[in-house]
Amino acid sequence: MNIGNWHFLSESSGPRRALKLLRFLAWFAAACTGVLQIWAFRFWLSPDGNTYLDIASNYLRGDWKNVVNAYWSPLFSWLLACCLAIFHPGPYLESTLLHLLNFVAFLLSLLTFEFFFRAFLSARTQLGWATLENEVLSEAVWWALGYGLFFSTSLFVLSLNITTPDIWVAVWTFLVAGLILRIRTAGGGLTLFAALGLTLACAYLTKSFYFPMSLVFLLTAWLASGAPRKALKDVALGLAIFILFAGPWVFLLSRAKHRLTFGDVGKLAYAISIDDIAQSFYWQGENATGIPKHPVRQLLTKPRLFEFGTPVGGSYPPTYDESYWMEGASPHFNLKGQLRVLRQSFGTMFLFFTDQAEYAVGLLVFFFFIKDKFIYAAALRKQWFLWAPPLAACLSYSLVLTEGRYVAPFLLLLWVAAFSCLLGKPSSGASCAAHAVVFAMLSVTGLRIAKSATSDVLAILAHPENTNFKVAEALYNLGIRPGDKVAGLSHMAQAHWARLAGVKIVSQIPPSDAYIFWAADDQTKLKVFQVFAGTGARVVITKDPPPFALDKDWIALGNTGFFAHTLPEQVPGDAEAGPAR
């Protein structure tokens, strides 16, 4: 399909051989760094990754009750379900498959970034931001700068070792930005707006944050078309296609929740951050944040012990659907909390700039080259549709929670916009000096990439072990079988071992209360074990317990740092007996 001259190799009068070589080097670097990073972390899985795998498995089993989830967006689970169905990786290679899927996303993000950057360079000439006569950087140097920004943001702000769908969000974000630039240069167009609506729907199905952002991007595209009245039918088509593809999921969520919703993660994240809910998994309505409708069930108070075996699925139910356990949470504005979050967000954004310090320094150098600062302000006004939407996204995250994986693609768009505004006129500095600054920035980025790749190589040569698989294997040798229930006495959110063993964690003492248990007398510990047994658990699993607390009843699960304690036969009704003191 040809959407606004969809192609990536430059057709300018610059030397094509240099551009082809540059592109080859960029893709070679992407392949090498990507493979090294995912292979070094192939056995590591975050709590999010484990949950997405659980949801994907439920799709394959046809467990439709447990796949409609207002906390986790569906597209990543759909992709994982397809991969699991096609490749059948087995427990040992399951985490590796997820990393390989995100490696594909990384390559696709480079492809869509090229789509965006090609549209950006075309817009610079077609919209009069710069001409061949007064362009400070040659086309090849612009591409070199773009690739440098891409690698710096993707590897050091976003990172490839994450096991979340955020790399896929980058794929859609670059595609959206490129389509808006083509809408601006073409003055609209039904095909471009239709493609924009479809892409925004894919982005929303990847991350619910994109539901409100889709309206921002559609409005931006409509105003950027240059003729809003003429483009009214175009944007209406884009909105209709967005609703057509995103609407069914909104309908399913709303029907499941018995209220209109496009996803609850934003509301819950605001309550957790602003109202300072320290342990959201065990929310009981603290800090006047609402009346819980069905929170995890507290069976003991000292130490706190919670049960959550039903009705939510997954190997660790508290993370499988946090929107169920926190149903009834009602976030409210808290000035002190909001200021605290903004301070944290500012600090996090500052760290991102230090991670990309070479580009910040380069921008300052170019800024001081400008004699007439009004030129920069005029460029900002002309290119508002390039920087306004990503700025809105970053500001939105700063109100709740800022993490590199959330804002990385938007930061990249802001970097490109900043350099574009500063390098629009000859007064920005002599071309030779500008090229030198760009090559200096790229040299620093190259050294950092080389250092990161070296660390990944060393990690690979150290032969990392699949700890989760070894724990699952040890549990099987202990007599624990798929379908059994277990309890936790440590941080359980990263319990990929439970999924690999086919068991379900149904009760837990939170990490903050673990020491209370370890310091308790034998009678109290026995009581805790009886309550655990009452929840249906066959064993209690803990990780890195204090040495003084270990005795012959705790069985080491290999050399993984995990230990298991078998429980007495289940006493019917114990789990429903109410809070124990």
Image (cartoon, rainbow, N blue to C red):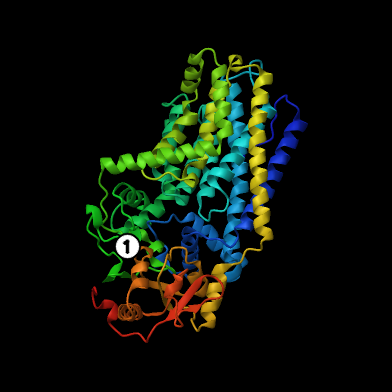
User: Outermost residue toward the right?
Assistant: 17
Where disc 1 sits, the SS reads helix
Residue under label 1: 282
Amino acid type, callout 1:
Tyr
Residue drawn at 64 percent across, 19 percent down = 135
Residue 385 image position (x, y, % from top left): 47, 29
Q: Residue furthest front?
A: 548
The foreground one among 107 and 349 is 349
Residue 289 in view here: no
The x and y percentages for residue 315 are 44, 69
The quadrant in which the N terminus is found is top right
User: Which quadrant of the figure has residue 290?
Assistant: bottom left
- Above or below: residue 73 compared with residue 403: below
Q: Position of residue 29 (x, y in %)?
A: 69, 44
Which quarter of the rendering shows the C terminus?
bottom left
Toward which corner of the image does residue 286 lie, by quadrant?
bottom left
Residue drawn at x 69%, y 59% is: 461
Question: Which residue corresponds to the image point at 48% horizontal and 81% vertical from the top-left?
Answer: 480
Q: In the picture provided, is 336 more to the left or to the right than 431?
A: left
**Residue drawn at point x = 56 percent, y = 28 percent:** 361
Does residue 102 sit above or below 67 in this rendering? Answer: above
Packing grade of label 1 (10 A; few <14, some 14-19, many >=20) is many
282 vs 21, nearest the viewer: 282
**Residue 180 vertical placement versus 429 (above, below):** below
Q: Is residue 97 visible in the rendered structure shown here?
A: yes
Please, is residue 360 above or below residue 474 in the view? above
Q: Position of residue 231 (x, y in %)?
A: 45, 29
Foreground residue among 118 and 464:
464
In the image, farthest residue toward the top: 372
